[in-house]
Structures are given as C-alpha cells and as structure tokens.
Image (tube, rainbow, N blue to C red):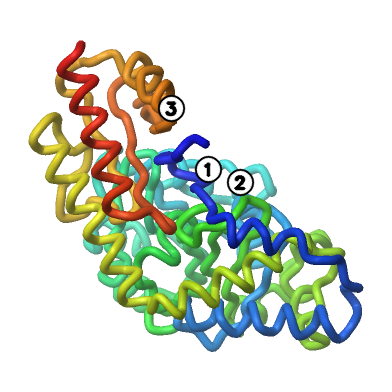
Amino acid sequence: MDKLFVPGPVDVGQDVMKQMQRPMIYHRGKDFSQLLENCVENLKNIMYTKNYVFISTSSSTGLMEAAIRNCVKKRCLNVATGAFGERWHQITLSNGKEADILQVEWGQVVTPEILDDALSKGDYDCITLVHNETSTGVSNPLYDLSKVIKKHDVCFLVDTVSSMGGVKIEVDKLGIDVCLFGSQKALGLPPGLSSCAVSEKALTIAETVKNRGYYFDFTVFKKYWLKKQTPSTPALPQIYALEYQLDKILKESLEKRYQRHKELAEITRAWTKDHFELFSEEKHASNTLTCIKNSKRINIEHLKAELKKRRLIISNGYGKLREKTFRIAHMGDRTIPELKELLDVIDEILVET
C-alpha cells in the first residue's frame, strides 16, 4: 500500500476504514440522531465553539459555496495568498455576488496592516480567508487578523480545510462566523464529508439573503439540526468513520495532536533548509504541509517517480508552482518514524541522481 504524503487525501487507519462497513440505519430514526449528535458535540470540542455545527455530504468546496450563498449580501472581500484564496474569489463571482480580491504574493501572508487598509477602503459586508494555504505552505496569522476584522462590521468566513484537527483554532474566540473544513486532511478520514461552524450572526444574515438554493441553505441545515437530522440523505459510512475518529482524536488529546503536527513540521523544515529552501517565510510556515522551493532545480517528476517505486507519494507544486516547488504533507495520523523514512529515501534518491 502506498504511503501518502500529499495534501489530501491522507492515509486512513484500517480501524477507521472498518467503521464504514457497519450496517445501514434509517437516517430519520433515533439511532441516526444519536450518531449525528455524537459527531457534532465532538466537532464542537475540536473547533472550540458553541455555534451551530453542520455536517455536509460534500467536499469543502461545497461549503465554501454555501458560505458565499448564505452570507454575502452586498459585497465581499476575498483575501488570496495562494490558489485556494483565489478559488474563494471565483466562487463568489460565479454565484453572482459582487467582490474584490486582495491579492498577496504567493509565499507571503496577508498582514493585519494590509487587511485593515483594504477593509477601510471598501464597502464590504463579508470577508473570506484561507487559514492554511496548501498551494504555498503558508499559514496566515489568524489570531492577529481576527483582531482587525473585529473592528469592521463584516461576516468572517474562513477555510480551515487543511489545518483543523492539526492546529488549534478557537472559532468563538476568533469571532469566525463560518469556519469550514473537510474530512480528508488533518482529521485523518476518507474524503466525502465537510463540516462547518456557523454563528448566529451568519444565520441571521442568511435569513435575509435571497437565492440561497436548497442543498446548502444554512437555515435548512438549522431546521433539520433542531430535529437532530440532516436535510438530505447523508453519507452514513463516512459518518460512522467520523464518529470513531473523533473519539480517537480526543483520546489522543488535542494538545498532543497539535504538538505532534508541530514536531512533524519542524523535522520537515529542518530537512528542507539542509537540502533546499522553504517557499514561505519560516515563521509563517504551515504545520500540516511544507512547500519546498526547488532551489537545486532537480527533476521533480523523476523524484516523484522514484518515490512511487518505493510506495511513497509526495506532491509537485500547485498550479504555476508546479516545477518550482514540491510539497510534503505531514498531517492526520502521520507519525515521526514514517516521515523520517520518507526523508531518508529522498536523501538516497538525491545522491543517486
């Protein structure tokens, strides 16, 4: 079996996969309501929130669209520090909303000063941000930025797709109105589910926004959650796995999980500085993925092919960075010995070539 060091999907334990073989139950019955409630309560613990938490049978991109359709009334500011910040802008425009993009050079973060200036100059009621940008390996300074956003009367929408479960993100303390993420990254689950915490403020706004659709209407999610149900038939196998994995994560303890991700990142960054260069500034480097500048101009496709022969999978750079960088993800249930094995094998391949 291949070992995945890519930015999702991640390797999933066989004990977690086995949960997906549990028998089907009726999604309008009491057993499902209890299952859903268990998942939501544990997600609230991981997100440090008392807000509503909804589970969607979709990718995270679906909930990005949901956030836009429900929360943008007039005009949105999309902060882009990489490809997925730019995707927020594409989604906003494609849903017929007015929007401006605050473009930051790839590899850099948006600073509180830049953000404050942009929000002061525009008439915005909403802002989108990617916390952990997997295209560049940058982690935006969420806590510093949240202080700026609290000064402005805007709805705060945050993509924590590749950080939630690997990095501490206190949703309520940060004042995030919609915080969304997927199952297949730092949570260590198969693809197919996404979750979001939605504030009362966001729900109140949603009630006044027209053309929210149905599948991703937050007011519909709330209506069904009050009955401990989902609006439509959920992906039961993935929810079984979610319940089991959330229990495992909390038994590991969140602080130990965050520390393990931090140690994995530090090992990868130290190796990177010995052999190549970090694409991002180190103080803003992600703890779930490292983006490595191809400073030695190696053949990245050759490296990937040689690793594949050894059942190890890494990722090339994203989009315009395809040949300029490569990426090593270290998230989910990845262990330090597994990471060191990968780095040792890369060392061998570099010597051979």
Figure quadrant of residue 287: bottom left
Q: Residues within 10 Å of mark 3 (few under 14, many from 20)?
A: few
- What is the C-alpha distance between the residues marked 2 and 1? 6 Å
Examine the rendering and report whether any part of residue 176 can be seen: yes
Query: Which amino acid type is marked by label 1?
Result: Arg
Q: State the residue at coordinates (45%, 47%).
A: 85
**Residue 4 relative to residue 37: left or right:** left
- From the image, tell me which residue sits under label 1: 87
**Residue 313 relative to residue 22: left or right:** left
**Quarter containing the C terminus:** top left
- Mark 3–mark 2 CB contact (< 8 Å): no
Q: State the residue at coordinates (38%, 53%).
A: 334
Helix, strand, or loop for circle 2?
helix
Figure quadrant of residue 36: bottom right
Residue in the foreground of this view, choosing between 177 and 315 = 315
Q: Residues within 10 Å of mark 1 (few under 14, many from 20)?
A: some
Helix, strand, or loop for circle 3?
helix
**Residue 278 relative to residue 324: left or right:** left
**Residue 69 relative to residue 10: left or right:** right
Q: Position of residue 343 (x, y in %)?
A: 24, 36
- What is the C-alpha distance between the residues marked 3 and 2? 18 Å
Helix, strand, or loop for circle 1?
helix
Figure quadrant of residue 237: bottom right
Q: Position of residue 105 (x, y in %)?
A: 28, 38
- From the image, tell me which residue sits under label 2: 91
Examine the rendering and report whether any part of residue 105 can be seen: no
Residue in the foreground of this view, choosing between 348 and 256 = 348
Q: State the residue at coordinates (23%, 51%).
A: 285
- Mark 2–mark 1 CB contact (< 8 Å): yes
- From the image, tell me which residue sits under label 3: 319
Q: Is residue 312 above or below residue 55?
A: above
